[in-house]
């Protein structure tokens, strides 16, 4: 019988071809050139406020590497709503995670995509949709809308290769910090943690002086 490690390796190998094929067709929409590593996904889930009661919203799950990590960390599948724009990826996600609420739709238009659930409040939002092509003002406006959908104490975590925060803080709404860089990823990257302004962050989530000194203006 194949081990869990062997099965996971085989799944990651099988994901490369459809991921690459989609990236070739839509490089800007995809952003990443390869599925995120298990270490990187683990870092994202570690900093997400999944310990709070309530549903979890995943935006841009791709082929489900973060979704699987959430489940491995004990998050009940019924708590997870995953919104994926690519129809083929969404079909694969539904087959892989039948108990997760997978919605094929636009993560930038949650009122339309969530429909009757548009007013729902989430314990955490995990964000992996490319937005660096957007002007900074548009990014901030988008995140302000996301924060209106969070429960008290909930946060938004973002996967990004950027050295500076992809979305700058909005005073009175959210602040931003980062995880350590994850070198075991292609390319190396970090998780950006957006917290409700006024809500304390753990030392592990806070940006360090080293993080700031190595950053470059965007």
Image (tube, helix red, strand yellow):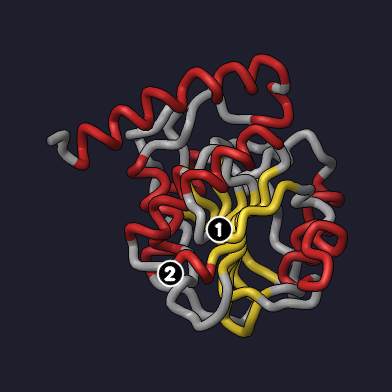
> Percent x, y for residue 192?
54, 53
Residue tagged 2: 76
> Percent x, y for residue 78?
51, 69
Seen in the picture, residue 58 relative to 115 is either above or below; the reply is above
Who's the residue at 84% across and 41% down the image? 135
Residue tagged 1: 157
Which of the two residues, 13 or 45, is positioned nearer the viewer here?
13
Left or right of 195? Residue 200 is: left
**Residue 6: quarter of image:** top left
Who's the residue at 55% across and 44% down the image? 93
Could one spot residue 192 in this view of the protein?
yes
**Residue 181: quarter of image:** top left
Name the residue at the left extreme.
1
| The C terminus - image quarter | top right
Seen in the picture, residue 74 relative to 14 is either above or below; the reply is below
> Percent x, y for residue 28?
73, 26
Q: Which tag, 1 or 2, sits closer to the chain's start?
A: 2
Seen in the picture, residue 172 relative to 144 is either above or below; the reply is below
Q: Secondary structure at mark 1?
A: strand
Left or right of 35? Residue 60 is: right
Q: Is label 1 or label 2 in front?
A: 2
Who's the residue at 48% across and 32% down the image? 35
> Percent x, y for residue 115?
83, 66
| The N terminus - image quarter | top left
Seen in the picture, residue 203 relative to 91 is either above or below; the reply is below
């Amino acid at each position: 019988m194949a081990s869990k490690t062997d099965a996971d390796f085989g799944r990651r190998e099988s994901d490369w071809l459809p991921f690459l094929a989609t990236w070739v067709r839509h490089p800007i929409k995809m952003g990443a050139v390869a599925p995120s590593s298990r270490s990187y996904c683990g870092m994202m889930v570690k900093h997400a406020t999944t310990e709070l009661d309530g549903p979890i919203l995943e935006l841009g799950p791709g082929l489900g590497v973060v979704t699987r990590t959430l489940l491995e960390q004990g998050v009940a599948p019924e708590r997870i709503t995953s919104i994926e724009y690519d129809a083929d990826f969404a079909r694969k996600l539904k087959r892989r995670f039948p108990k997760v609420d997978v919605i094929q739709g636009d993560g930038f238009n949650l009122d339309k995509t969530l429909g009757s659930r548009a007013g729902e409040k989430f314990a955490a939002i995990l964000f992996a949709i490319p937005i660096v092509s957007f002007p900074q003002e548009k990014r901030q406006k988008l995140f302000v809308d996301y924060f209106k959908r969070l429960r008290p104490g909930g946060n938004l975590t973002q996967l990004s290769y950027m050295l500076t925060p992809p979305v700058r803080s909005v005073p009175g709404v959210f602040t931003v910090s980062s995880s350590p860089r994850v070198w075991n990823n292609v390319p190396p990257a970090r998780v950006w943690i957006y917290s409700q302004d006024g809500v304390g962050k753990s030392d592990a989530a806070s940006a360090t002086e080293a993080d700031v000194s190595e950053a470059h203006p965007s």
